[in-house]
Amino acid sequence: MIVTLAGGTLMALTLTSPAFEQGGEIPTMYTCDGRDIAPPLSWTGLPEHTGSLALIVDDPDAPDPQAPKMTWVHWVLYNLPVSAAGLPEGATSRDLPPGTREGRNDWKRTGYGGPCPPIGRHRYFHKLYALDAVLPDLGTPTKAELEAAMAGHVLARVELMGTYQRSQQSGNRSGA
């Protein structure tokens, strides 16, 4: 897990999942080849003065890890309340903590879209941000719009990275 604070100091912010370990394989059930549901996530160690949290899940290896051309965004959440300690397996809009807002992923919709790499083994970064404020209503922002709104508000950040590679028998769905 990588933990970075604005001042470069390390602290105890953690992000974990019982579904996979840091750098481990994301189980098929959380991908387009399975049930395509969000893995359970939990966090601890929020810095003092945290006002809200944001979560971005993305894949910097799209479309081909040997020649990446873009970062594919799988999930965008913001204004998660500091009282939340995580998200349940299969979290959808109705399961999100009160006040949580959803952004748009690269399938042009809200909600989680699981790994679906067209070729090779991809890395999927689950990035949790502790912010010093509750952000204004951004509608359904893209990752870039959320990152712009978070600028100057990030107290700490932690990443949980998992990998996934489709079997040769897997079908074709657009995504990464």
Image (spheres, rainbow, N blue to C red):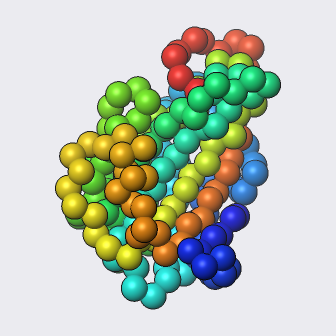
Is residue 44 depicted above or below 142 in this figure? Answer: below
> Which residue: 70% across, 12% down?
169
Quarter of the rendering occupied by the N terminus: bottom right
> Which residue: 75% across, 51% down?
23
Q: Residue furthest bottom?
A: 48
Quarter of the rendering containing residue 121: top right
How many discs mark residues in the rendered view?
0
Q: Is residue 34 visible?
A: no
Is residue 161 depicted above or below 50 in this figure? Answer: above
Report the side of 125 relative to 94 (left or right).
Answer: right
Give percent across and percent down for residue 10. 67, 80
Is residue 37 depicted above or below 22 in this figure? Answer: above
Q: Nearer the viewer, residue 35 or 131?
A: 131
Quarter of the rendering containing residue 6: bottom right
Report the side of 81 relative to 27 (left or right).
Answer: left
Give percent across and percent down for residue 109. 32, 31
> Which residue: 52% across, 46% down?
57
Report the side of 154 relative to 62 (left or right).
Answer: left
> Which residue: 42% across, 68% down?
152
Q: Is residue 133 visible?
A: yes
Q: Nearer the viewer, residue 123 or 90?
A: 123
Give percent across and percent down for residue 30. 55, 39
Give percent across and percent down for residue 164. 69, 35
Quarter of the rendering occupied by the C terminus: top right
